Image (tube, helix red, strand yellow):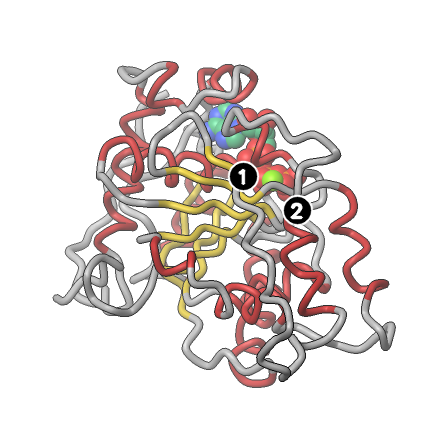
Amino acid sequence: MTAHTGVGEGLGPRRIALINEKGGSAKTTLVASFASYLALHRGRRVLAIDMDPQGQLGKVLGVETRRSTRSAIDMLLDTVLGERPSDPNAPERSPLPISPTRTPNLDVIGSNKSLAFLPALRPESGASETSELRRALDDSAEINTYDFVFFDAPPSFGALTLNVLCAADEVVIPVPLTYLAMDGCAELLRTIAEVRSRYGNPALQISMVVPTFYRRTRMANEILAKLKSRFPKEIAQSVIGYHVKIDEAQSRGLSIFEYAPRDRAARTLAELTEELELRGRDFAELPRPVREPPTP
Ligand SMILES: Nc1ncnc2c1ncn2[C@@H]1O[C@H](COP(=O)(O)OP(=O)(O)OP(=O)(O)O)[C@@H](O)[C@H]1O
Ligand SMILES: [Mg+2]
């Protein structure tokens, strides 16, 4: 297996989007945990980009985002309002609105409500433009100094999620083990297929499906079994249960690895991050089977 690590291979960073249209499925939690673990314990340079107007990722990573702080919308504005003029003396695109976090090697591009106005800012309002984020990143020299770029997507489906799916090479899908989970997955798979075929990102791959909010109930086990059979290769080897320490850590702007490194939540999230690190663009030969769910 040739795992793509994003390091020293001349391919640029792995660009990984956490997507699920279902709210509260642990997208932001996983972006923050993957990013923190890779920076803290794996020596990777990581950029986490918040593409959700709720603007929670910065908070969770302990970064104070004031109204005056440049944010994701500033990164997209040049692209939204037109290409950089071909005049070689034209001013260069401004640098990405990156804020450092407390953790060395972990940076964030925060967001706020103004990001929700993205579609309205387009000169031709209603145009189905979906490549603004990709172009903004491709035009930036800084992006190649990172090993991983994570995108946190909003819960609702729309222009922002489409932009994220067009900018990403890989998708990680957190699936809360609830009754409607499979419906959401089917919908998401249709969206991903459409992004591959109609929106110019044919290589978009699902790198991992992560069961979240696992409880040892019959319903949760049935849904988990369905997920495993639907995603035999993509299903993660660990599942995440309910862990109050996750919420507590986030309320303090700390990663679980700093707040409660010995808690089971930290161990599970570390295992998941290491698994994601192994799953590059060619992960088909990863060893199976799935680990047993944790005892509550
Ligand atoms: N395994 C867990 N155990 C306990 N609480 C969790 C767990 N994972 C996430 N949470 C909490 O659940 C809430 C929702 O998680 P999170 O914000 O990561 O979901 P999301 O998918 O990003 O939501 P949204 O769609 O609104 O952006 C947060 O308060 C988070 O701290
Ligand atoms: Mg979120």
In the rendered image, the residue lying farthest to the left is 1
- Say which amino acid is labelled 2: Asp
- Name the spot of residue 201 as percent of width and height, x first: 50, 78
- Place of residue 224 in the rendered image (x, y in percent of width and height, measured from the top left): 41, 46
Disc 1 marks which amino acid?
A: Thr
The residue at label 1 has a CB less than 8 Å from ligand 2: yes
Q: Is residue 23 visible?
A: no
Q: Is mark 2 within 8 Å of ligand 2?
A: yes
Q: Reply above or below: 263 against 106.
A: above
Quarter of image, res 240 = top left
Q: With 109 as the anchor, is 81 left or right in this view?
A: right
Instruction: From the image, tell me which residue sits under label 1.
Output: 28
**The image quarter in which residue 164 lies:** bottom right
Q: Residue at x 64, y 73 (%)?
A: 90
For ligand 2, the image quadrant comes to top right
- SS of the residue under disc 2: loop
Question: How many other residues sit within 10 Å of disc 2, few (<14), some (14-19) or many (≥20)?
Answer: many
Q: Residue at x 58, y 47 (%)?
A: 97
The reply to whether dot 1 and dot 2 touch (C-beta < 8 Å) is: yes
Find the distance from the CA under tag 1 to the CA under tag 2: 9 Å
Instruction: Name the image quarter holding the C terminus.
Output: top left
Q: Which residue is mark 2?
A: 52
Query: For the image shown, how many numbered marks are present on the structure?
Result: 2
Q: Residues within 10 Å of mark 1 (few under 14, many from 20)?
A: many
* Nearer to us in this view, 271 or 116: 116
Q: Is tag 1's residue or tag 2's residue first in the polypeptide sequence?
A: 1
Residue lying at the far front of the rendered structure = 89
